[in-house]
Image: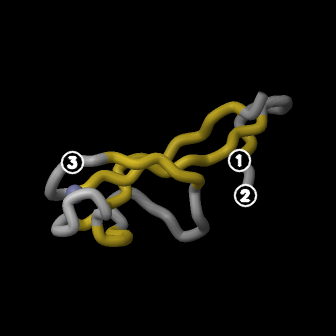
């Protein structure tokens, strides 16, 4: 999936997930259906927390 901001700028969407227990953040490629506050998988770092989508942003493809 690609997002178009301006005419010649192609943005690659990324998703930041944050654990609600240990606050660990991970960055990964945006997946279809992602939205802010969406609960995703269990945290692999602390094993207790739940990962939630914190932010979705686009990076300019060079
Ligand atoms: Zn955690």
| Residue 58, placed above or below residue 31 | above
In this rendering, would 34 be left or right of 7?
Answer: left
In this rendering, would 8 be left or right of 27?
Answer: right
Q: CA distance from mark 1 to mark 2?
A: 7 Å
Read off the residue under disc 3: 23
Mark 3: is the Cβ under 8 angstroms from ligand 1? yes
Q: Which numbered circle lies on residue 61?
A: none
Q: Secondary structure at mark 2?
A: loop
Question: Counting other residues with Cα less than 10 Å from the Cα at mark 1, is it few (<14), some (14-19), or many (20 or more)?
Answer: few
Which residue shows up at 77% across the image and 37% down it? 10
Q: Secondary structure at mark 3?
A: loop
Q: Quadrant of the C terminus?
A: top right
Q: Quadrant of ligand 1?
A: bottom left
Q: CA distance from mark 2 to mark 3?
A: 28 Å
Read off the residue under disc 2: 1
Read off the residue under disc 1: 3
Q: Secondary structure at mark 1?
A: strand
Question: Counting other residues with Cα less than 10 Å from the Cα at mark 2, is it few (<14), some (14-19), or many (20 or more)?
Answer: few
Q: Check whether the beta carbons of the residues at disc 1 and disc 2 lie within 8 A of each other.
A: yes
Q: Check whether the beta carbons of the residues at disc 2 and disc 3 lie within 8 A of each other.
A: no
Where does the image place residue 31, in percent across and percent down from the top left? 58, 63
């Amino acid at each position: 999936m690609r997002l178009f901001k301006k005419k010649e700028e192609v943005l690659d969407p990324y998703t930041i997930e944050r654990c609600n227990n240990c606050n660990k953040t991970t960055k990964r490629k945006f997946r279809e259906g992602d939205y802010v506050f969406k609960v995703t998988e269990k945290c692999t770092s602390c094993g207790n927390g739940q990962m939630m989508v914190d932010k979705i942003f686009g990076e300019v493809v060079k």
